[in-house]
Amino acid sequence: MNDKKIYHLVKRLYPICRSITGNGVRQTLQILSEYIPLSVHEVPTGTTVFDWTVPKEWNIKVAWIKDSHGNTIVDFNNHNLHVLNYSTPIHHKMTLEELQPHLFSLPDQPDLIPYRTSYYQENWGFCLSHHQLENLDEGVYEVFIDSTLNDGYLTYGEYFIKGKSEDEMLISTHICHPSLANDNLSGISIVTHLAKHLSEQKNHYSYRFLFVPGTIGAITWLALNEPKTKNIKHGLVAALLGDNGAFTYKKSRQGNTEIDQTVESILSEMEIEHKIINFYPYGYDERQFCSPAFNLPLGNLGRTPYGQFPEYHTSADNLEFINATNLNQSYEVYQKIIERLEYNYQHSHNYPTPQPSFCDSNEVYYINLFPKCEPQLGKRGLYSAIGGNNDQRNRQMAMLWILNYSDGEHHLNQIAQMSNIDPQTIYDIATILEKEQLLEKVSIHKNTLV
Ligand code: ZN
């Protein structure tokens, strides 16, 4: 593919202020519907989805800060990253000191506007460059955010293409980020064009495409569609596909499924620079699809991983940061993977079956009592319960590792090894999670052969 149509769709979607709910998502899905016949689902606020609840719907029209002379100094209309995503409404005059806690900037990247959200803790705020923040005078500021946070819906898009077989491939991408090009729009555009392409040919597999808000959208889909997951034979989470970096494939939690083998083969055969990494229980929505009760054969294929490029979650992840050549190459990789899976399906039905593993009777095994998607740790105060020391990030990661691998097959020392986190931390955190009734210690006999 040599043209710029993938880039053009990114460019069209870039100005829209998206979030995990609201009209920005609807407007985005409306545009995608011009390419593919998308089903748009609306899930009411308050719907219980496993351990989570569909949040209130957020919409925003206007947001600005004016200085004491009445000059607008920060304006949502100039860049939608200027407002803390999910900000509650406010109209108030205040001193710089009162305003300060609601301003977010990046001291290490002083020219850039950060991307910040506050979905599950009601707050309001503005994001601005550190240079601008440093130049604010003492004085009175007028702050206005014309937003709504009310009962409404969580909106997601789904497109299903029926193939000869009921066996399915799932491709999922997140649609919740505002004006950020690589993180979210590159995936949305590539998945849309891929779906359009597959709808124009006969396929052996059925294909399901999900355009969902990150985390809560994937959890919602899984909660409402649990029986459908049995047909999913392969899956990919698509994100970060427009930058110059090498490809990164994060394997499925099972680690040696047909999709894992196929992605690896295609990247090698195409002689594209790439890295293959093992599954870890954070990142994008693979963390839900690969939660222990689902454990779907699904990996994540992108370029530079999240957080590993300086433009990540800033105003520099813009239309200049990505380009048509990179997007087209990513599209080609996805297309070749699908062609290979189709070919293999036609020629054999060769799915490697995971080998049963034996437990070691001297080790400590736990079972995650919330194995379908991640439990909502925030509402239990667990992020702060384990915090308060310099090692907070490590302890948070330990929580995710323990929850994901406490399936009766992995003991704590194994989890320590896989995560590279010291065993003492793993044991400490497991004890906290057990107290919170998220984990239960299991007797070895019950699980001798899993
Ligand atoms: Zn992101």
Image (cartoon, rainbow, N blue to C red):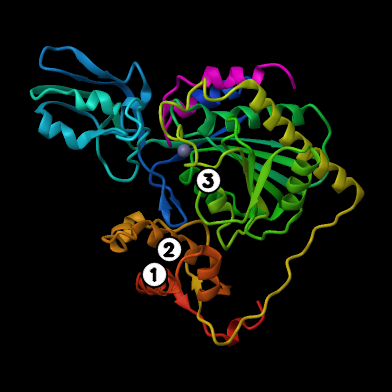
- Residue 66 spot, x, y in % from top left: 18, 18
Q: Nearer the viewer, residue 67 or 441?
A: 67
In percent of the image, x 89 and y 46: which residue is there?
346
Contact between labelled residues 1 and 2, with CB atoms less than 8 Å apart: yes
Q: Is the residue indicated by label 3 positioned so its CB lies within 8 Å of ligand 1?
A: no
In percent of the image, x 85 and y 48: which residue is there?
345
Q: Quadrant of residue 356?
A: bottom right
Contact between labelled residues 3 and 2, with CB atoms less than 8 Å apart: no
Residue 92: mark in rendering: none
Q: Is the residue indicated by label 1 positioned so its CB lies within 8 Å of ligand 1?
A: no
In percent of the image, x 67 and y 47: which residue is there?
235
Mark 2 or mark 1: whose residue is earlier in sequence: 2
Q: Amino acid at mark 2?
A: Met
User: CA–CA distance between discs 2 and 3?
Assistant: 17 Å
214 on left or right of 62: right
- Please identify the quadrant where the C terminus is shown: bottom right
Mark 2 or mark 3: whose residue is earlier in sequence: 3
In percent of the image, x 48 and y 67: which residue is there?
402
In the image, the segment drawn in magenta is 1-26
User: Which structural element holds mark 1?
Assistant: helix
- Residue 234 spot, x, y in % from top left: 71, 49
Residue ranking furthest to the right? 347
- Please identify the quadrant where the N terminus is shown: top right
Q: Up-down: is 272 above or below 29?
A: below
Q: Give the residue number, with chain letter if any, for mark 1.
A: 429
348 on left or right of 361: right
Q: Quadrant of residue 179?
A: top left
Q: Quadrant of residue 391?
A: bottom left
User: CA–CA distance between discs 3 and 1?
Assistant: 23 Å
Residue 399: mark in rendering: 2
Q: Give the residue number, with chain letter if any, for mark 3.
A: 284
Mark 3 or mark 1: whose residue is earlier in sequence: 3
